[in-house]
Amino acid sequence: MDQVGTQWEPVRKASPCADQEQEFDGHCFLIDAERDSGIKEWTDLGVNVIAIVYGTPSWARAGRPCSPAARGFEVFCVPNHPSDYARFAGMLAQRYDGKHGHGRIADFVIMNEVNSNDWFDIGCGQGKPCDAKSWLNAISANYNATYDAIKNEQSSAKVMISLTHHFGRVYDRPDSRSPTLSTMTVLESLAARAGERRWQVAYHPYPPIGSRPQFSADDYPKVTYGNIGILLGWLRQRFPNTPSAWEVELTESGLNSLGPHSSEEVQASQLRVSFRNVLGTPGITTYIYHRGIDRQEMTKSGWAPGLHRADGSPKPAWTLWEQANRNDVTPARLSCGFEVLPHITLQRGFSKNRGHFASTRRLPSGVTPEKTWKLLRNPSAKTRELFECKEKSYTFISDSPDCEGRFPMGPVGYAYSTKVKGSSPLYRCYNPATGDRLITSRNDCESYRVKEKLLGYALAP
């Protein structure tokens, strides 16, 4: 649920506060009755409420340079003082802590897409180059102050930084008309400034081209539904001593259903793949789809990611979304990867031009599936975590979070460390003649000659 500062505190007003206002730290915040009751209703239903906390009131940014990307984007100008933004978030954390009869906000997303100047405006862009150091400093200052304010009210709340799919360093483009910073650069900067704070990530894995619903395992340097494992793998590799960073929430993403490159049927088909890729990536705990219903003004521009049309009628994608994980009925109706939980499917494939692949996410185009196994999505007694890693043009499986120094493609689940009923060994083998690797349950390595290691034991599909 969006929590917008311009609605909560349109003017700066000191206490005492009126009946329909919330007092916090000497400030008065307006209470929206519908939003207020909604948080309580969802909480009472047992649903986790996540707040997207953004929107700088005009009084909190007065005199500060800002370059709105479009009309109405003024709310994305950063505040003059992080303490004003932090106070707003702290108020939300106190009011909705589950102890005051208003329900609970358990997860907080700090600002929106801070690695895009369109959505985190530090006063540049639209033809004026940004100073990357100032940008990174503003991100960290606002995050740290807000983290502390939230944690002071709810010590167990998650506090996440919001990022776009511009992952690789090629997207460090502070001089472009719509400036961006890469996810890599922002998170390294935040980690260096966060101290002991247990920072976490909220990510938006939209397809590479917004108007097209297609995505693939080869989308890097963007990280999308197709290669979402890269984000989780890189976090494990880059921040081995920060366990909070290994858990990610997908808090906004959607698939267009209009235009020459899409249709409602294609949208549903791609949604099915996104489910399997997300379920096949341990560490992702939340998948929020954007949007539930199309906006008429958005469809006129060819953008219709909604699960329902603007008139409220459902699309095929809604039926899939609503039915894919129905474990509340007998017999259960499960698909898109939900049917194999608590396991996930590890698949081996081969391409003549690229070599072997092994992943719990969809294999790249042109790679022919060969074999499958089942791993656990979550850790259990006597299991070890496995990871997909990239070497040259192919991928292989490792039991090292560091991917043995190779490029990380993401966690793939947990294998048993000893043989259990119904399991078979999972070997990694190497062919010196071609430089290729494969995984197999055969002791002879299928003619690949060098048995590199026993990765563990996996169940039959």
Image (cartoon, helix red, strand yellow):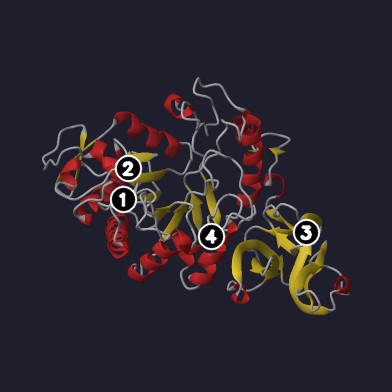
C-alpha distance separating marks 4 and 1: 27 Å
Relative to 75, is 274 on the left or the right?
right
Residue 229 occupies quadrant: bottom right
**Quarter of the figure that contains the N terminus:** top left
Q: Amino acid at mark 3?
A: Gly
At 79% across and 60% down in the image, what residue appears?
A: 350
Q: Nearer the viewer, mark 4 or mark 2?
A: 2
Disc number at residue 69?
2
At 22% across and 51% down in the image, what residue appears?
A: 79
C-alpha distance separating marks 4 and 2: 28 Å
Q: Amino acid at mark 2?
A: Ala
Are the residues flagged by discs 4 and 2 in contact, CB closer than 8 Å?
no
Count of picture labels: 4
Between residues 348 and 326, which one lies in front from this camera angle? 348
Sequence-first tag of 2 and 3: 2
Q: Nearer the viewer, mark 1 or mark 3?
A: 1
- The local crowd at label 3, few if under 14, some if 14 to 19, many if 20 or more residues have their Cα within 10 Å, is many
Q: Amino acid at mark 4?
A: Leu
Q: Which residue is mark 1?
A: 125
Q: Which residue is mark 4?
A: 231
Q: Nearer the viewer, mark 4 or mark 1?
A: 1
